[in-house]
Image: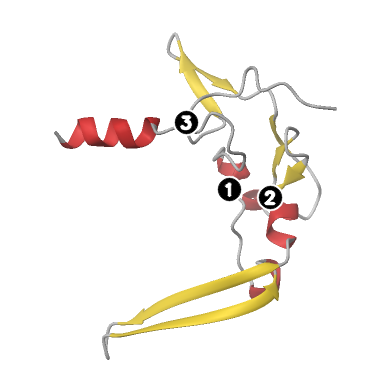
Amino acid sequence: MKKSKKGIPKGYYCYTHKNGRQVNCPYWGIDKIPGRDSQENGYCSYLEKSDWDINDEKKDIEIQSHDPNTKEDRSEIYRNTSDHELGLTSGLLWDQCKECDVRRGLGFWRELLLFIK
């Protein structure tokens, strides 16, 4: 069944502000599973995914690093692995950052450009 995009806020976050109050996306929530870190407990019912699911997905991951002593840049690619396998987390639903592309737009960049001017 196709889900309605109504109520999903514009921008990069799972919330917006109206009349001085924060209004959360109707699909955002906290996945309260015992033993999970607080930075892996976000959930999106629009995507039907949690931070835990996102961090468990197999993908190619490139890790870049810079050694300030030698001024050398390095890059390592890990094929068909997950963030959890590397001890990383990339899901940001817990921090109310969108993982969906719905109504993302360029709002942030427009605001940044206006701020810089």
- Determine crowd level at label 3: few under 14, some 14-19, many 20+ residues with C-alpha closer than 10 A: some
C-alpha separation, residue under disc 2 versus residue under disc 1: 7 Å
- Mark nearest the camera among 1 and 3 is 3
Q: CA distance from mark 2 to mark 3?
A: 19 Å
Q: Position of residue 103 (x, y in %)?
A: 54, 28
Instruction: Say which residue label 1 marks.
Output: 92
Estimate the x, y position of residue 99 in percent, counting from the top left.
Answer: 61, 43
Q: How many marks?
A: 3
Disc 2: CA contacts within 10 A as few (<14), some (14-19) or many (>=20) = many
Instruction: Point out residue 109 in the picture as x, y percentages from the top left corner.
Output: 33, 37
Whether label 1 touches label 3, CB < 8 Å: no
Tell me where residue 30 appears, x and y as whole percent: 71, 37
Q: Amino acid at mark 2?
A: Asp
Dot in front, 2 or 3: 3
Q: Of the numbered discs in the image, which one, if any, rests on residue 51?
A: 2
Q: Earlier in the sequence, mark 2 or mark 3?
A: 3
Secondary structure category for the residue under label 1: loop
Q: Return the residue at label 3.
A: 11
Question: Does residue 75 appear to the left or right of 1 in the view shown?
Answer: left
Find the distance from the CA under tag 1 to the CA under tag 3: 15 Å
Which amino acid type is shown beneath numbered disc 3? Gly
- Do the residues bearing badges 2 and 1 touch, measured as CB atoms within 8 Å? yes
Q: Residue at x 37, y 34 (%)?
A: 108
